[in-house]
C-alpha cells in the first residue's frame, strides 16, 4: 500500500487564493506591504527573493526591495531598519539571510519590530510563540501545522518526533506542538538509537538537512511523515526522507519538492497580511 | 539499593555563599538591588516575598518592596513599572504573581525591561532562552540544570522526559535541554502511556503538580528523577514523586522539600546579580 501524499503545492495554492480574495476585498485603504532588505548579491538569495516578490505580487501584497552594498556597516543597516520600523506604510519587514560576516545577524533580527516581523525570527516573537500568545509564527513551522491540519491529523495526545533543533524550524515547531497538546520529542545528532525513537512516533517531522536520513527503519504503517529537508544531491533537489521506500509503508507523507517548501512562502504571505490587519486596525 | 539524594538545600547554600562572596568583593560601587512589586495582600504572596527578601538580605542584595492597593489600575501599575525600568539604581524587577483579575499579567510581564527581568518571564527573555542567546533564565529551570550539573549527570545525548508544559518550567526547561543536546520529550495530561514514556528516560523531570503521580512504574534503575512538584496533601508539603518507593529504585533523586525549591530562590538571586553586572558594566 502507498501513503497518501499531502501536497503542499495544492494547499499553498488554495491558501494563496484565499489570501488574494481577502486582499481584493480591502476597500478604501492601501494594500499590505512587505519590504525586503538584501545586503550584497548572493545568488541563492537573489533566487529566494525573486520567488518571494513574485508570490507577493500574485496575491496583491505590495513589495519594496531595498538592496544594499555588501560593505554597508552594521550601524547604517540598523538606521535603515529603524526607518522602516517607523514607516507607517510598511507592514512587514524581512531581512534576507545570510548577511555578510561583519554584520551581527542577532542584532539585526532583534531590531526588526515585533509588529513588522514577517519571518517570525525576532526573539520576542519566538517567546510569544512559546507562550502561545501570538498569531505570528515562523513561516516553516506554521506551514507544517497547516499541512497536518489540512488532513485532520490529530495532534492532541499524538506522539510527534522532530529530527533537528534549529532556531527557525525544530525549536519553535516543538513549542507550537506542545501548545497543541502533542507529546513532543526533539532529536538531534547526539540522539541515541534515532531510528528506534522515530519509529515510535505517530508523526515524524524531519528537519535535519541530510538526504536519505529517514529510511524504512524509522517509520511505521500508521505514521505521518513530514519532510522539511531541502538538500541537493548531485544537483537534484531532495528532502531528508527516502521517499520511494518510506512512502510504501507510512499513512501520509509530504513530497520534496512540493511539500513544506511552498507552504513556507504561503505562511510568510499570511504573516504579512496579519501584520497589516493589526497595523491598520490599531490606527 | 537506595538512590543518591541530590540536595538542593545544600547546593543552594553553596551557591548563595559564593554569591555573597562575589557581592562582598564589590568595591567603590553600590550593591545589586531588586525591587519587588506586590499588588494586594495575598497571604501566600506575603510568605513568598518574605522569603525572597530574607534571601536577598543574606547575600547582600538590596531590596525594595513596593506594595500597592489591590484596586490599583493597570495603567497606574504600568507607570510604576516604567519608572523602575528607567531607575538606574534598580537592577532587577520582580512582580509577585498572581495579580488581581482586572490587571493583565501578560501586559505587565511584557513591560518589565528585558534588562531587569529577574524572574525571566518576559517573552523576549524566553525567546533568547530558546535561541540560546542569554545568561538570564527562568529561575526554576536554571535551578534544575544546576542540580543535574552538580552531580555531573550527562545531558549530551541523554533521553530527558519532562512531565508538564508550563510557561515557567516545562517549556523553557525543554528549550534549555535541547540546546544542551539532550533528546527531550515533553509530556502533558493528554500523553498516551505516560508511565511507559517516562520509563524510557535517563532523566525524568516531573513538573505536573500532582502528588504521587510518579510511581515505580515510571522509573528505571539508571534514572535521575527531578521532582519539581509543590503540592499540599492533608497539609503536608510534597512533590509529584512517590519518594519512598521510587528512591529505592532509581540512581539519583531530588527530595521535596529541599530539592528544586531552594534552587529557585538561589537562581533568582543569581539573575539579579547578573543583571547588576551587565547594568554596571554598560555604564
Image: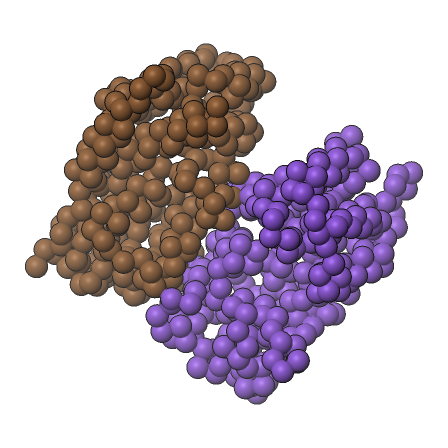
Chain colours: A brown, B purple
Instruction: State the residue in front, A123 or B254.
Output: A123
Q: Quadrant of residue A249?
A: bottom left
Q: Residue furthest right?
A: B28
The x, y position of residue A102, in whole percent, is 54, 23
Depicted A82 relative to depicted B84: above or below: above
Quarter in which the N terminus of chain A is drawn? bottom left
Where residue B279 appears, as percent x and y from the top left, is 75, 37
Residue drawn 30% across and 41% down?
A143
Is residue A158 visible to the viewer in this orientation of the structure?
Answer: yes
Q: Foreground residue, B163 or A28?
A: A28
Q: Residue furthest left?
A: A1
Q: Nearer the viewer, residue A271 or B241?
A: A271
Q: Residue at x 51, y 68 (%)?
A: B208
A263 left or right of A104? left
Residue A68 point in image, percent of width and height: 45, 13
User: Does any portion of residue B270 appear in the rendered image?
Assistant: no
Pinpoint residue A22: horizontal percent, then vertical percent: 27, 28
All told, the count of numbered labels is 0
Residue at 53% x, 16% y: name it.
A83
Amino acid at each position: 500500500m502507498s501513503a497518501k501524499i499531502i501536497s503542499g503545492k495544492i494547499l499553498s495554492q488554495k491558501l494563496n487564493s484565499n489570501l488574494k480574495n481577502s486582499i481584493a476585498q480591502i476597500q478604501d485603504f492601501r494594500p499590505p506591504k512587505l519590504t525586503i532588505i538584501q545586503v550584497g548579491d548572493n545568488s541563492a538569495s537573489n533566487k529566494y527573493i525573486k520567488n518571494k516578490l513574485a508570490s507577493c505580487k500574485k496575491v496583491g501584497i505590495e513589495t519594496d526591495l531595498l538592496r544594499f552594498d555588501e560593505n554597508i556597516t552594521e550601524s547604517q543597516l540598523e538606521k535603515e531598519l529603524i526607518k522602516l520600523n517607523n514607516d507607517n506604510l510598511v507592514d512587514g519587514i524581512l531581512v534576507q539571510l545570510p548577511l555578510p560576516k561583519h554584520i551581527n545577524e542577532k542584532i539585526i533580527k532583534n531590531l526588526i519590530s515585533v509588529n513588522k516581523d514577517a519571518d517570525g525570527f525576532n526573539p520576542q516573537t519566538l517567546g510569544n510563540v512559546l507562550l502561545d500568545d501570538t498569531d505570528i509564527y515562523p513561516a516553516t513551522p506554521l506551514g507544517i501545522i497547516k499541512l497536518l491540519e489540512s488532513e485532520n491529523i490529530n495532534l492532541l495526545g499524538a506522539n510527534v518526533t522532530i529530527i533537528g533543533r534549529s532556531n527557525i524550524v525544530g525549536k519553535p515547531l516543538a513549542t507550537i506542538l506542545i501548545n497543541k497538546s502533542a507529546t513532543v520529542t526533539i532529536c538531534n545528532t547526539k540522539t541515541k538509537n534515532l531510528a528506534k525513537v522515530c519509529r515510535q512516533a505517530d508523526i515524524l517531522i524531519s528537519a535535519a538537512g541530510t538526504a536519505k536520513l529517514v529510511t524504512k527503519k524509522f517509520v511505521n504503517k500508521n505514521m505521518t511523515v513530514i519532510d522539511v529537508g531541502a538538500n541537493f544531491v548531485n544537483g537534484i533537489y531532495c528532502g531528508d526522507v527516502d521517499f520511494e521506500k518510506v512512502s510504501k509503508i507510512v499513512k501520509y507523507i509530504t513530497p520534496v519538492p512540493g511539500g513544506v517548501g511552498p507552504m513556507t512562502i504561503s505562511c510568510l504571505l499570511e504573516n504579512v497580511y496579519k501584520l497589516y490587519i493589526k497595523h491598520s486596525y490599531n490606527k
